[in-house]
Image: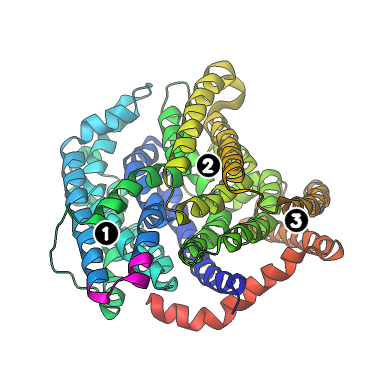
Amino acid sequence: MTTKRKILRSASVVALVTVVSRICGYVRDQRVAFLLGTSPAADALVLAFRIPNLIRRMTGEGSFAASFVPIFTDYMRNEPPQRTWTFAQRVFWDMAAVLAVITVVAVLFSRQLIASLTFLGGNHARWDLAVYLNHLIFPAVFFIGLAAVATAILHSFQVFALPAATPVFFNLALIACSFGIVYEPIVRWAPERFRSPAVALAVGILAGGVIQFAIQVPALVRRGMRFAATVSTSDPGVRKVARLMVPSFFGHGVYQINLFVDTIFAASSRMPTGSIMSLYVADRVMQLVLGSYAIAMSTALLPAMSHQMAAGKWEDVKHTFGFSLRIVSFITIPAAVGLILLRHPIIQVLFQHGQFATESTTLTSRALLYYSLGLPAFAAIKLITPMYYSTQDTWTPAWVGLCALILNVGLNVSLMYLFGQALLNGSPALASAVSAYMNFGLLFWLFRRRYGRLGMRRVTAALARMAASAAVMATVCWVAMRRLPFAMNGHLLAQAGWLAVVIAACVGVYFSLAWALRCEELGDFFLLLKRAEPAAESLAGSAL
């Protein structure tokens, strides 16, 4: 089996389970929106969850794996099993010790932590609830971090289904806590002034973090992992992981860090109430595409590239990157166009229920507009960073990520003070989108300068065909939304039906044009889907 087919098979496994996870994530977010809308309590929950979620998303999307997998695969190829597993155990327990210290400090200093996120102003009365929620949520970081170690080990063995399924259980825990039969008894335990469904959702986050780690333990034990406590800071392999880990967290997770910065600016008194929640929901909608394909490909790329580098197949690494960029762009370019044009009806159909009112939809669709502009760049960053990490270079993406972060902060300040009246809560999203393009462009330029051509003529030609197909699709979408009676029909099922018809028509137009223009990526995309079908049953079994 060629490397290309291996990557497609691995990516299809991750994509299939990730789609299930994103669907559960939508149900989770819809329940949160239903219960809290874009109220102060919703902002407090998102704010308290932002740092744990930052760690969860960064580790879950490969930041820890970027430093661990290349070294662990080298141990697997060149060291006896006993030494390999001793190294893994030391990394596990060292990580546990660090996470324990971080968790205790964050819980003890919750008020100072929340204050550091809201220094730009706003209604500080609501942040008292955020402090209380942080006490409940932050211990989840300990288990989420250990789950990341387990995931990285399993990825090294080319096991992708079970780690990809762990967010499903995380989401199910939150969904369970969103129903009255569960959350009402939990809320009664809270102090009277903090009695809100947000408290039960915070408990659900903690339970979900525990489950994410626990369900991976049996798979680790079957492959030889033992959990004998062996803390060591002198092991050469552990030291190497530590040296690579700090920059990899920053370089690989710059998108999540920028979201964190966006949250700080969204808490400003210059922003409308509900801005934090609106940015969170807009990001979650975009993540359905970003997570299903870009992160799936990125997850499969790092082990493949690491093995290629260990075997000295440098040209294969370049070819793998070009192929991955083409197939992910084939999905993200039309997806970005569709989200931009259909942002309001999508948010209305998915979330406008209960406490999530018309004003909430307007706020969220504005943020989704600007996040969607950056979707192709967000996806491309996920693909180019594994190429650096496969060479055990984590510092270059970190320095480039720092430049992107500085640009994001500068744009946030400029847009908020100069164009705040026009952009409102869209300014943080626009800042993140612009900084993402700079991030990818600089990473690409540096890699090409150091290691030579990356075969971009073929990629550029493919992107031109995709852009032409997407432009025609956009025209069809715009005409359809003007002709169909979506806005006049107030019934949810009718609105959902009209929206589904428009999306299906747009997908049909795009695929037809891609076929007419002989886009090679169309065949690769269907191969990706075909690879996922035979794995469906085994995925369900391994996830459960």
Of 492 and 47, nearer the camera is 47
Q: Tell which circle, 3 or 1, labels the residue nearer the N-terminal end.
A: 1
- The amino acid marked with disc number 3 is Arg
Q: Position of residue 474 (x, y in %)?
A: 78, 48
Q: Where 482 sits versus 540, above or below?
A: above
Name the residue tied to disc 1: 146
Name the residue tied to disc 3: 458
Q: Position of residue 470 (x, y in %)?
A: 77, 51
Q: Where 382 sits versus 8, above or below?
A: above
Instruction: Give the crowd class for mark 1: few <14, some 14-19, many >=20 residues within 10 Å.
Output: many
- Would you say residue 74 sits in the magenta stretch? yes
What is the C-alpha distance between the residues marked 3 and 1? 41 Å
Does the residue at mark 3 contact the one at mark 1 (Cβ under 8 Å)?
no
- Answer with left or right where residue 252 lies relative to residue 202: right
Q: Is residue 132 visible?
A: yes
- Would you say residue 361 sits in the magenta stretch? no
Name the residue tied to disc 2: 357
- Answer with left or right where residue 107 lies relative to residue 337: left
Q: Which residues are magenta?
A: 73-82
Extreme residue toward the top, this view? 418
What is the C-alpha distance between the residues marked 3 and 2? 47 Å
Q: Position of residue 416 (x, y in %)?
A: 53, 21
Of 243 and 295, nearer the camera is 243
- The amino acid marked with disc number 1 is Leu
Main secondary structure type of the part rendered in magenta: helix
Circle 3 — which element?
helix
Q: Tell which circle, 3 or 2, labels the residue nearer the N-terminal end.
A: 2
Q: Quadrant of residue 265?
A: top left
